[in-house]
Image (spheres, helix red, strand yellow):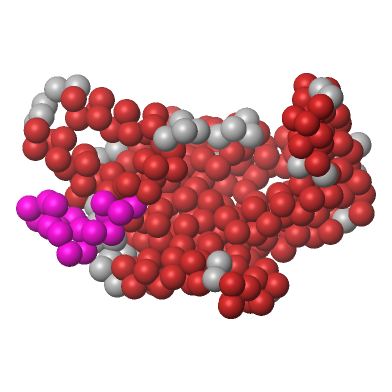
Amino acid sequence: METKSARIPEFRYLALGAVAAFLYGSTVFSLFFAMPLQTSWSRGGYRAFFVSLSVALAGTAGWLFWQYRGLPFGDLGGFLLMLSLPAGLAGAMALANAGFLARLPLVYRVMAGSLVIVAISLPSIYSLFASPNVQAYLLQGIEEMTRTMDSVGGEGYAGAVLRSSLEPEAMLQAARRVIADGFAAVLFGATFLGHWLGTRAAGADAPGSRKVPALSSFSVPGQLIWAFLGSWSAVLSLRLPYLAGLRSAPFLEALAWNAALTVSLCFAVQGLGILRHLLERIAPTGPLRWTGILLVVLLLFNLKTGAWTAGTLTVLGATETWIPYRTSKGVQT
């Protein structure tokens, strides 16, 4: 007979799966979908992970069906395509925890997992964009938005400039380009953050907690500096006039941007770890350590200061390759 104590862990993993489904359904926090799944893996291994995953995918499927029923992409094919993103995030988390990759640094494991998401989700998203019904639906939404903004712009020169810059077809193409240029980088960030926060949330006594270092001791493998320099050199090279012909191949530009943003994110986290380390030295105890990090996070999410803050953190992390900001190098995991 099954005891109550034996049923409690399973209920916990069922609850974590429900939390994952809720996060995805919230839209705003959908990229945190994998975090509760990682907590389950850290606490109970792959069996607990699959228990949580089953609940998460069932809940997500129900929400997608209810939310998008009656829309052009609400049929079975579109439904399965939209379900590919949470399934890809779960697959990335499973690969990042795979035993045969255990000896690799955390960054490389998450990169490998991100390739799984891209391979599964990117073709699905492009298939949705290529559907005539979906394009008509998106164009209708863009036209309604432009009519609203057009009424705000009014007549005269300012209104004419606004109308000329809000061509629906051009906006749809721009959206496709933005997705292509940053899709892999965004999903890498979601996988990395989900793995990190999910493992830390599992608690210090969890078997998987020892595999993730504290933020103040985090550093990326030194070899990534060459990927950083090479990818940004490729991005800048594609802006040169005599290489403008290469820009006619969107794949090359998307590859360069995704690589540059992904590696920059790694160094930005390292820069945040350097800042955390310095704050710990200045104030070993007290609220100053968390106040400084909170201020940086607020600057990152500010439209005026976000890009500058992210760039500063990235440069700070990258230059630690040559300048020892911390007395001891961070742990590579």
Residue 108 in the figure: left or right of residue 169: left
Q: Position of residue 306 (x, y in %)?
A: 44, 38
Q: Nearer the viewer, residue 274 or 144?
A: 144
Decide which of 77, 54 is in the foreground and name it. Answer: 77
Q: Residue at x 70, y 72 (%)?
A: 248
Quarter where residue 23 is shown: top right
x then y, percent, for residue 318 = 28, 59
Left-right relation of 13 to 204: right
Expressed as whole percent of the image width and height from the top left, the position of residue 70 reads 91, 37
Q: How many marks?
A: 0
79 relative position to 239: left or right: right
Residue 133, visible in the rendered structure: yes
Q: Nearer the viewer, residue 49 or 310?
A: 310
Residue drawn at point x = 62 percent, y = 30 percent: 26
Residue most toward the front? 157
* Magenta highlight: main SS: loop
**Magenta-colored stretch includes residue 326:** yes
Q: Residue at x 37, y 41 (%)?
A: 309
Q: Which residues are magenta?
A: 314-331
Q: Residue at x 47, y 57 (%)?
A: 261
**Residue 44's x, y, as percent?**
40, 47
Quarter of the figure that contains the C terminus: bottom left
Identify whether 6 is placed above or below 229. Answer: above
- Can residue 81 be seen here? The reply is no
10 or 279, which lies in front? Answer: 279
| Membership of 166 in magenta stretch | no
